[in-house]
Amino acid sequence: MQKFTKGILILLLVSVGLIGHAQTVTTASLLKEMTDFNTVTYWPEPYYSAGMASSYDRLSISPDKPGWFANGDKSQFIRVEQKDGRKEYVMLDEKGPGALVRFWITTFKRAGKLRIYFDNSSTPEILIPSYDLMKIDLKPGPALLIPHSSYEPLEKGGSTLYLPMPYAKHCKVTWEDAEPEVKEPRYYQINFRKYAPNTTVRTFSLKETRNLTGLMEKVNAQLLNPVNITKGKQSLINQTILPKQVASVNLPKGSNAVKFLSIEVSGKDNSSLEKLLRSTILKIKFDGEESVKCPIGDFSGSGVGGKPLQSWYRTVTAEGKIISRWTMPYQKSATISLENQGDESVSITLKAISQPYSWNSSSMYFNAFWKFSEKVPIKKWDGTGAIEWQLNKIKGKGILLGDSFAVFNYMHTWYGEGDQKLYVDGETFPSEFGTGAEDYYNTSWAPVVLYQSPFANAPRADKEDSYGHNTFTRTRNLDGVTFKTDFKYDLEMLGWADGEADCAATTYWYAFR
């Protein structure tokens, strides 16, 4: 009788998913994941690897062959299919299980039809009557469907869709042009997750998603107005730090996580703030090892000058207050330090709020790394002698969740023509090959304007011709990049003319030790 009861209990536990059964991936589960600050601190379960299909120039084959810096990143497709008397240009063709998690496109004139097919169906689940994601027959909301800063409703410009679309067996995305041949420039980036073969996925459907209106409204509200944690144990630094001196505070001992961090900086006058934000270094040790070392301003995502920023993980207020909502867990101990590397005193108020955290074998540490290079050579995109500037190279196991790119451009013309190249686990060809720096940051057409959104922002743009300070930042949510042994992020240094730029990059990721 006892054995029978025990067997029934195990059967019940399996049936409700408590043991031996992975969560089913659905549109709803992915939407909920988008607004959970804790989820990203754990190695993903079910596991996924990240992929991206894009219109990068197919002349780019290998770093040791001509064409590696080719810049014809438009209207490049996998193949052309003839179907019911029409041409469909295939943009993505992926076996499942998986999920589309970011869809970026831009063009000039948009006439044609965009189709998304799931699970080898001959009928598209989504048909958009234009090369324009804003025309999708859904209302995902302003945090999940974002027009670019250059977007014009009638013709030029693009948009980015963050509505997750899971699929069990297969996904194909195609474009049918209004012309017999594609003449307009069709640029695209489609980020997707590739789940392990045994992952249970419920395929996206319009009918089901239309019934998720309430959930999507909730997700939009959370992403656009993230809540700052106020309850927990507070740790404070409130003092004037002399040149070459350090101020520190120890956080509560035991298994905890920093859930909120705010920093306010002031100097002898407002004109010195820009300098102080670069010369004051934030350092954080978790369990005895330093994993954050970054100038305060760059850590915030605002780059140089403390300009306003409003995003999911970070905020910089109009008054210059820096707020971080990254969850930063540790097992036993943590210390936050502020080092004044400048030549004048800096007054700082730092507040950290910590809460208990459930540490287990899947938990990872938060990392932030800063790199700065002066006078990086920019080459005209149709010339020779270009280089790649490396934002970061990581050894180990973890997940990339974003970066900030702060530039001082010495040219009076666009510097960001180059593509991002992300390599994972020893790849010799990048699994993410971009179409231009601004495209990576969710905009298009060489913008030098301010914009804000939950996952991509431009908090500083000094001049319309791109001279001076420019800052782009992007954090990755469902489109985080997992790696098991190593990760590398290179950026082609291409522009519209030969010149130079000072480049600073802050990279954010979680990792095991």
Image (tube, rainbow, N blue to C red):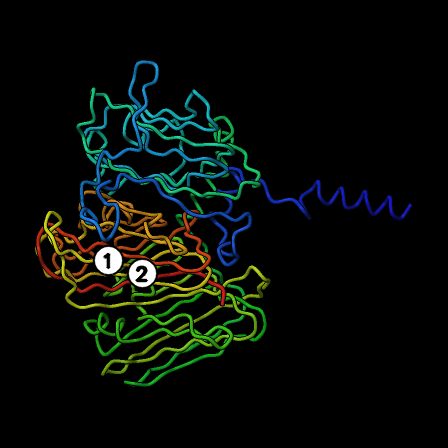
**Drawn side of residue 307 relative to residue 30, left or right:** left
Residue at 18% across, 43% down: 445
Closest to the observer, 424 or 118: 424
Q: Is residue 303 left or right of residue 382?
A: right
Q: What amino acid type is highlighted by mark number 1?
A: Thr
Q: Residues within 10 Å of mark 1 (few under 14, many from 20)?
A: many
Residue 424's mark? none
| Position of 343 relative to 328 (above/below) | below
* Image coords of residue 49 (percent x, y): 45, 48
User: Which residue carries the number 2 mark?
Assistant: 301
**Mark 2 and mark 1 residues within 8 Å of each other at the beta carbon:** yes
- Which sits in the foreground, 472 or 351? 472
Q: Secondary structure at mark 1?
A: strand
Residue at (21%, 74%) from the top-left corner? 272
- Quadrant containing the N terminus is top right
Q: Secondary structure at mark 2?
A: loop
Q: Which residue is mark 1?
A: 471
The crowd level at tag 2 (other Cα within 10 Å; few <14, some 14-19, many 20+) is many
